Image (spheres, rainbow, N blue to C red):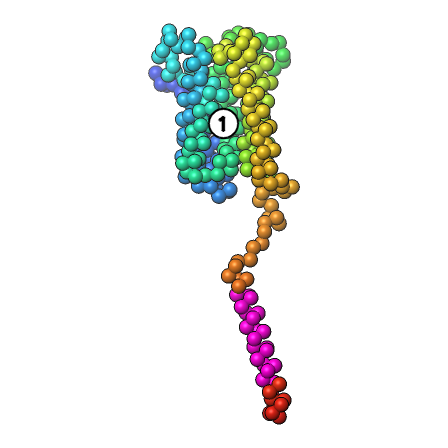
Amino acid sequence: MHPVLIELGGFSIKTYGFLIAVGFAVGLFIALREARRVGLSADAVADLAFYLLLGGIVGSRLYYILTNLAYFRQHPLDMFKIWEGGLTFFGGFILAVILCVWMIRKHRLPVWKTLDVFAPSLAAGVFFGRLGCFTAGCCYGRECSLPWAVTFTHPLTLARSGVPLHPTQLYSALGAAVTFILLYSLRKRKTFDGQLALLWGLCYSCERLITEQFRGDIRGGMLTDRIEISFVIAVVLIVASLVLFPVLRKKTGLRLFPLNTPHLQRKTVPVNSTRQQHHTGCSKMRRCRARDIMRNEACVSGRPV
């Protein structure tokens, strides 16, 4: 649609890169706010977000290169032209998860609680990223004659030009928006740590499997003539989410109410306070007993009490 956002002389800002930056900024803002709410270190979360961005970009580009080796062997310098598209989400996701777990252990953060903090941010990032794909023309759909079909006409577009296509980028953006609303609304009502992260994996993978049926771009990475690697990764992520969901819930303990429900929090009495009350009660008993003894002796001796 609009691959170039601003162009001044020989300098230009690609709309795709701009929206990726916006998505990262919005996601970081949400993650930092959520980290403060749940009591995690904001500095550690910001440090973790930087490595997630780095791992996401490097991993997504590396995956795309490995699945299109024939082209990049003939055009090796094109490996670095990420502004022209060619970032595969699952490649970035895999490397980002590896770096994420490493950084979480380095900062000694709770793994699943930290992943929950990033889950809504990840959905927001995917939303802006898919809008960027739409402006660049990558990840385009198959030819169709539906009323909402889009036709790319810009000379720099990466999509098939002049043909009505499924707006698969917008399909994915819509799925990411719905996922974000779901996760953001549930963040204060979750019943165990890891619930938001698993819900994101389940929602994104289901959306990906549906959207893949309408994709028309050539991405490479085929296991067979009809089965793509991204399809297999999505299925594995769905199975993993469904398996881990009851495991984490059982590990945390089945709760009928959210973790932060005030009336379910135990009211503990300090040990020192309990001991103090015990000693105070014993002292009163000793004083009363001594008073009774003195009264008995007074009665026997005839002294007034």
Q: Which residues are magenta?
A: 276-295
Q: Magenta stretch: residue 90 in it?
A: no
Residue furthest to the bottom: 302
Work out whether residue 181 can be spotted.
no
Question: Residue 300 at what x, y percent from top left?
Answer: 62, 90
Residue 265 at x, y percent in the picture:
59, 49
Dot 1 alpha-carbon crowd within 10 angstroms: few under 14, some 14 to 19, many 20 or more: many
* Farthest-out residue, right: 256
Above or below: residue 287 compared with residue 166: below
Q: Residue at x 49, y 21 (%)?
A: 90
* Residue 255: x %, y % from top left: 62, 41
Principal SS element in the magenta part?
helix
Residue drawn at x 60%, y 87% is 297
Residue kind at label 1, given as amino acid type: Gly
User: What residue lies at 44% left-to-right and 17% top-to-bottom?
Assistant: 63
| Count of all numbered marks drawn on residues in the image | 1
* x then y, percent, for residue 267: 58, 54
Q: Nearer the viewer, residue 120 or 4?
A: 120
Vertical arrangement, residue 165 with respect to residue 89, above or below? above
**Residue 63 or residue 121, whichever sits in front:** 63
From the image, tell me which residue sits under label 1. Answer: 125
Q: Is residue 287 visible?
A: yes
In which image quadrant can residue 96 be found? top left
| 278 in magenta | yes
Q: Nearer the viewer, residue 277 or 145?
A: 277
Quadrant for the C terminus, please. bottom right
Q: Which element is circle 1 on? A: helix
Give the residue at x 55% y 62%.
274
